[in-house]
Amino acid sequence: MENQRYMQEGLDVKRILLLLCKKIWMPAAAAAAGALLFGGVYLLIHVFSASEREFESVSKLYLNFNCDPQDFNELTYNGYTWNDLMATDPILDVTMEALPEGTERDMVIAATKAEILSDIRLLTITITTNEAERTAQIMEATQKSLVHLGETDRLFDSIEVYSTVEPRQIVWDNRTVNAAVTGAVVGLAVSLLLLAFYYVMDDSVYVARDVEKRYGIPVLGMFASGRDGQEKESYGREFAANYAYLCRNAVTVAVAALDAAADALDAAREMEAAAGKGSAPERGRELHGAERMPEAVQTAAAGGNGLPQLCVAGSVEEGEEVYRKIRETDGVILTVRFGGGNGKRLERTLGNLEKQDCGILGIVIIKAEEKFLRRYYFGKKGAVYGITDVSVNR
């Protein structure tokens, strides 16, 4: 049921995008890191760990077969076998005789590549070694052995050398930029996906919708630091209106903190100021009955300004004593920190308050980011539901 409720909550795309904007540096950093990583690895493999420079020589030889063209496909020397035939004794022995003494057979085999690219009568020989002179020597010796094969093998009339390209150094195809671009794209995509996944799974409270849609508890307002006096007055009126109406039947209201005990006192002071009631109750004063209330509470309870009096109960994490204080009031207003990763703790706390017969009048979101709230609700005008722009001690 719980998972189903979260699925039905829907995806607040605007909230996610605004939160992503706050961490836009992370995708940029991930893209830069990806570019450096991919580019660095490519350079490491192709430059620092590369073998010595290599030289390549290519020769074309024409094969004059001693048969009719229609019989070419039945020949032993076809396009699929030449590379293997070059390492056999009839060809390789003659090649080795033409090379300087001490030349290794395995090195010659590894350096030689024979292939039929199109016409079965045109053989392409490629010799690759790490020395230009050695490459030329092996190519010359290979050509001699193939010409000799054409003279001795009854399947040929002859084998002729058509062309030879002198040894040339193989130039490295530098694709470092391509590797860096690929790394940047991968880093950017992965970081955006991870950030989006994080914020989709984030159970923090950012706006009133997060509380009201998930838990069905009204949000009286939000406290955020602000600079605009006109907005401050407007937000204060909105909070005061919500507070006066939602708590209209209460005489005393407890203020309890979800995250830290100090939050309850700070929020109570801000709520008093926004509602125009004067001084808030001081932290640590216990609520056992009217005779134990602070003087300001007694005056308000007696009908001084028609609004309920706030009493600080502390943090809900303090346990049984806090629940007792709340039960001695007409209900509790719970403070929840903006973006505090506290959704599951809020869910647990609401359950405990219900079990303890503590009436929940509403929630106040504290330490909110005014810039975020302005953009989320009404852009730069900032006419935000239930926000009071007075500073909260941080």
Image: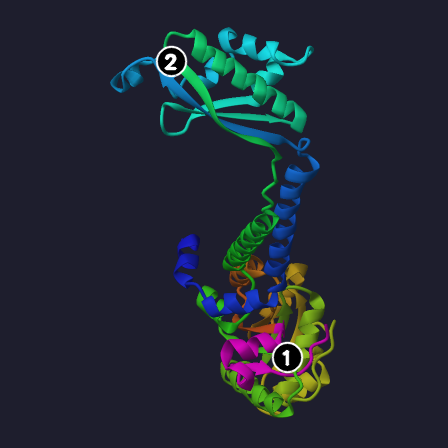
The residue stretch that appears in magenta: 366-394
Q: Nearer the viewer, residue 298 or 175?
A: 175
Helix or strand or loop: what does disc 2 sit on?
Answer: strand
Which residue does the image show at 64% across and 38% down from the upper left?
46
Which residue does the image show at 71% across and 77% down from the upper left?
292
Q: Nearer the viewer, residue 77 or 7?
A: 77
Q: 10 Å neighbourhood of mark 2: few (<14), some, or many (≥20)?
A: some
Image quadrant where residue 115 sits: top left
The amino acid marked with disc number 1 is Leu
Q: Position of residue 391 (x, y in %)?
A: 69, 80
Height in image: 113 above or below 229? above
Q: Nearer the viewer, mark 1 or mark 2?
A: 2
Q: Find out whether residue 312 is within the magenta segment.
A: no
Height in image: 112 above or below 381? above
Height in image: 235 above or below 118? below
Q: Position of residue 334 (x, y in %)?
A: 59, 70
Q: Nearer the viewer, residue 35 or 277?
A: 35
Q: Find out whether residue 384 is within the magenta segment.
A: yes
Which residue does the image show at 51% across and 58% down from the upper left?
196
Image quadrant where residue 28 sits: bottom right
The amino acid marked with disc number 2 is Asp
Q: Is residue 216 left or right of residue 390?
A: left
Q: Is residue 288 visible?
A: no
Instruction: Identify the image quadrant of the C terminus.
Output: bottom right
Which residue bears the numbered disc 1? 310
Q: Position of residue 81 (x, y in %)?
A: 41, 17
**C-alpha separation, residue under disc 1 versus residue under disc 2:** 112 Å
Helix or strand or loop: what does disc 1 sit on?
Answer: strand
Which residue bears the numbered disc 2? 157
